[in-house]
Image (tube, rainbow, N blue to C red):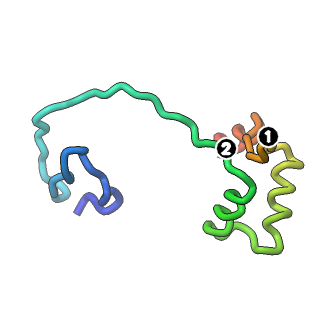
Amino acid sequence: DIYHPWERWSTGQGELPRALVGSRITPTSLTMNEGQTTPPQPISEVELIALMDKNGIGTDATIAQHITTICERHYAEKDHNQRFHPTKLGIALVEGY
């Protein structure tokens, strides 16, 4: 089955039809929709800690040090609402990875 990684995809008009690897599919129509993506909202320290814990990054004893390092190395900065914003250096490191 070719849909395994995308099992939850939908056409907006119902589920995608089943197809087997190697089968031919002839589209009946094509629609181009114009739109824009938006960047995710900045996250708070509490949200960052929850994400780090969920993804197995650090331990309870080291998470605070990881966050301090992120700020000290200027990968991200906190705004007046205590939300993290990536710096140019932080973006460059992610894009270069």
The earlier-in-sequence mark between 1 and 2 is 2
Residue under numbered circle 2: 42
Q: Tell me which residue sits at (81%, 61%) in the image.
A: 66
Is 74 drawn above or below residue 5 in the view shown? above
Front residue (pair 24, 27): 27
Quarter of the image for residue 79 reads top right
Q: Amino acid at mark 1?
A: Asp
Element type at marker 2?
Answer: loop
Is 80 on the left-hand or right-hand side of 46? Answer: right
Would you say the residues marked 1 and 2 are in contact, meaning their CB atoms lie under 8 Å apart? yes
Q: CA distance from mark 1 to mark 2?
A: 9 Å
Which mark, by number, is residue 65? none
Residue under numbered circle 1: 79
Front residue (pair 5, 67): 67
Circle 2: is it few (<14), some (14-19), or many (20+) Cα within 10 Å?
some
Q: Amino acid at mark 2?
A: Pro
Is 35 on the left-hand or right-hand side of 55? Answer: left
Circle 1: is it few (<14), some (14-19), or many (20+) Cα within 10 Å?
few
- Rendering coords of residue 87 (x, y %): 77, 37
